[in-house]
Amino acid sequence: MTDEWIKPAGGARMGRPGRGTGTGMRMTSAPAVAASGEETGPTGVREPAGEVHAWLPGQNQTVCGLPLSRTRLRRFPHVRFDYASTDVLTGEDPVGRICPRCLAATEGRRRDEKHAWVRHAPRP
């Protein structure tokens, strides 16, 4: 890799070549899990525990905006964020809390519903 600067058409400095999102981590639209703790499952694979957040691999923050490094959240890129607002957590679950802001951001709207509200009797 060379230390030459890339100059765009305007002449401003952009940065060094080879830097940015091409570091080997894929940008994906399917959120993974970032959690405050971890447990080793019966198969020997790390599993999330504690407070669970949605995280897009390739970013340094959760979907709800928490920075991963400052909040000391551990990344679990092999675990998909497949939680729903109707999930019930028991005392036996290693997951203690699911972030409600991450749930709202990942659930999205229903396909048949275009708007959040509809006026049934509009004024003349």
Image: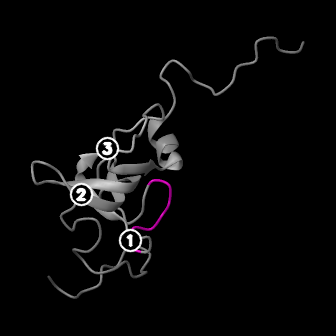
Badge 2 element: strand
Residue 30, label in figure:
3
Q: Residue 40 placed where, x, y %? A: 18, 56
Q: Residue 56 placed where, x, y %? A: 35, 53
Q: Earlier in the sequence, mark 2 or mark 3?
A: 3
Residue at the right extreme?
124
Q: How is the image coloured?
A: one colour
Image quadrant assignment for residue 67: bottom left
How far apart, in angstroms, are the residues tagged by discs 1 and 3? 22 Å
| Mark 1, other Cα within 10 Å: few <14 / some 14–19 / many ≥20 | few
Q: Nearer the viewer, residue 39 or 92?
A: 92
Q: Compared with residue 58, is residue 41 higher up or lower down, i.e. above or below?
A: above
Q: Earlier in the sequence, mark 1 or mark 3?
A: 3
Magenta region: 63-69
Q: Compared with residue 124, is residue 117 higher up or lower down, i.e. above or below?
A: below
Q: Residue 96 placed where, x, y %? A: 41, 51
Q: Main secondary structure of the magenta part?
A: loop
